[in-house]
Amino acid sequence: MTSRPHHRPARRSGSYFDEIIGGADPALVTEAGDRAAELLVRGARESQDDAVAERLLHLADTEGIESIAEVWSGSPADSLAGCLWRLFLLRSWVYADSAAVAREFEAGRAQAQVARVVAGVADPPGIEELRTMVDQVLRGIAGGDFADVLFRASAFARVVATGRAVLSHASPAEVQRMLVLAEQLEAAGHTELARGLA
């Protein structure tokens, strides 16, 4: 075994750090994301304008899910920004892979009766019914109780996770990811409910 001689780290002057070119300050990005989420949810609710709800619904379509992810994906699951990220991600996934989502939901609904009812998907749950449900959930950000929005999305994710487990086509990690999403949305719903009661 060879030993390296210990050396002191090189001292850097202030100008060294000034020359480093990097991205945006993560703290500023987080702060901007939190502020945008607050304005979207609270501002949309106060506007009482159906057009605002429609713009909010299509935010990921117009701005791109990648743009939203850049700002919100690192936010804690129980923060407003973290909740919005998960909701928009869920909607994007339902639209991108509707047939698979419908199969998973159909397979899980018999095993997760309560969650199926809370999710509020029409019976039988086809592609259009799932898209309609996820759009109604996101419209609820502007016009409904935000805790209810989170509980419905959580229930939907729980039924899908159950369906994945029943069908056995998904890996345990994929089932677990969907269950974690359901649990995060449910916990955030309870937090939102407590905030509303305070």
Image (cartoon, rainbow, N blue to C red):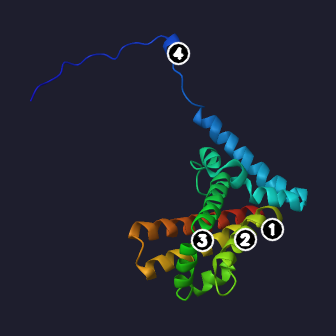
Residue 197: name its quadrant. bottom right
Using the image, tell me which numbered label, if any, was put on residue 148.
2
**Rendered view: 144 above or below 128:** above
Q: Could you classify mark 4 by the number of other residues whose Cα lies within 10 Å: few (under 14), some (14-19), or many (20 or more)?
A: few
Q: Nearer the viewer, residue 4 or 25?
A: 25
**Left or right of 73, for residue 55:** right
**Rendered view: 109 above or below 85:** below
Q: Could you classify mark 2 by the number of other residues whose Cα lies within 10 Å: few (under 14), some (14-19), or many (20 or more)?
A: many
Which is closer to the viewer, label 3 or label 1?
A: 3
Per the model, the C-alpha gap separating discs 4 and 3 is: 48 Å
Under circle 2, the secondary element is helix
Which is closer to the viewer, label 2 or label 4?
A: 4
Q: Do the residues bearing badges 4 and 3 touch, measured as CB atoms within 8 Å?
A: no
**Which of marks 3 and 2 precedes in the sequence?**
3
Work out which quarter of the rendered image holds the N terminus and state it: top left
Per the model, the C-alpha gap separating discs 2 and 1 is: 7 Å
Using the image, tell me which numbered label, if any, was put on residue 144.
1
Which is closer to the viewer, label 2 or label 3?
A: 3
Under circle 1, the secondary element is loop
Whether residue 175 is visible here, answered yes or no, is yes
Residue placed at 59% from the left, 49% from the top?
A: 75
Q: Do the residues bearing badges 3 and 1 touch, measured as CB atoms within 8 Å?
A: no
Image location (x, y in percent) of residue 76: 58, 52
Using the image, tell me which numbered label, if any, was put on residue 98.
3
Per the model, the C-alpha gap separating discs 2 and 3 is: 23 Å
Using the image, tell me which numbered label, if any, was put on residue 19.
4
Q: Do the residues bearing badges 2 and 1 touch, measured as CB atoms within 8 Å?
A: yes
**Which of marks 3 and 4 precedes in the sequence?**
4
Whether residue 198 is visible here, answered yes or no, is no
